[in-house]
Image: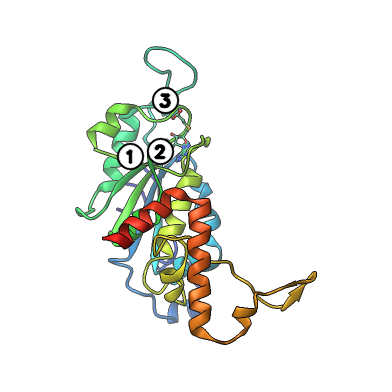
Amino acid sequence: MSDTGGKHGNSQRSLGRKTIRPSLKPRELMTPIPDLKGVWAARIITLFPNAFPGVLGESLTGKALQDGLWKLETIDLRDFGIGKHRNVDDTPAGGGAGMVLRADVVGPAIESAQAGTGPNWPLIYLSPRGKPMTQALMQKLARADGVTLLCGRFEGVDQRVLDHYNVQEVSLGDFVLTGGEIAAQALIDATVRLLPDVLGNADSTVEESFSGGLLEHPQYTRPATWQGHDIPEVLMSGHHGRIRDWRQMQSEEITRTRRPDLWSGFQEKKDT
Ligand code: SAH
């Protein structure tokens, strides 16, 4: 895959430190560029490549992108459009409102995105009909070599292309967005933070919500008293055993009352 366009004349944009560009200042050229071959990559097929990296360019995910711990490549669906106007959509067969992304546009974009990828590279369509995103999915994706994400628009994508490439459908939740880009960014954010060295403190991914099948306990920080509310006394006791027990109890209580579905899963796991 190149940054200058392949046989379809597509312009793929790479973000993060993938290439040494002549525009780099001499001082920057002197700092070692990490070997980014084999780095986890997200390839995004979208009509809106400018929406990336978006929020992923901020904070920990943004720093990790700069540091070459992962990479981001966008594939502009418009480049695969048909005719002078580069049409990507057409009216739904059978009638009805809206437009559908054409199979003969999305298909070549998928082919281009998947070029050179191995078997450990899932192909995902962000879709309200998909399996809801879970921490378990993010853990699986973080162990892959990378992922290709297809962002829909309008009424979605011609079903034949999803069937033909056996595309996995994943949903951000039971609501309808105008496009897959926000869902793609959510998926990438949740996955990238699980990659080695992205979070400074590896323990934070072990203890946080979902990791043990439970939601996280409440968190507090200074000041010790705020608007007349104190931090729970046990957390100020310095007694690590009691703190651990209290947090576990809180986690279980919050999960039981807020998420009966997670709670029954947790109990089943405990019983086996
Ligand atoms: N007509 C479709 C909705 C299309 S919304 C339906 O009723 O199912 C346009 C695009 O936004 C979709 O193709 C999908 O890529 C994206 N999208 C919308 N809601 C989403 C969600 N909950 N999760 C992930 N992607 C979503």
Question: Along the horizontal axis of the image, is 8 left or right of 259?
Answer: left
Estimate how packed mark 2 is, as few (under 14), some (14 to 19) or many (20 or more) residues with alpha carbons within 10 Å.
many
Q: For mark 1, give the secondary structure.
A: helix
Q: Is residue 224 visible?
A: yes
Mark 3 CB lies closer than 8 A to ligand 1: no
> Which residue extends farthest front?
271
Query: Mark 2 belongs to which amino acid?
Result: Leu
Q: Is residue 213 above or below residue 43?
A: below
Q: For mark 2, give the secondary structure.
A: helix
What colour-coding does the image apply? rainbow
Q: Residue tagged by mark 3?
A: 100
- Asked if disc 2 and disc 1 are in contact, CB closer than 8 Å, the reply is yes
Q: Position of residue 253 (x, y in %)?
A: 51, 60
Picture disc at residue 77: 2
Q: Is residue 222 above or below residue 157?
A: below
Task: Tell me the distance, in whole angstroms, between the alpha carbons under discs 2 and 3.
Answer: 13 Å
Of residues 172 and 75, the one drawn nearer to the viewer in this rendering: 172
Mark 1 CB lies closer than 8 A to ligand 1: no
- Work out which quarter of the rendered image holds the C terminus and state it: bottom left
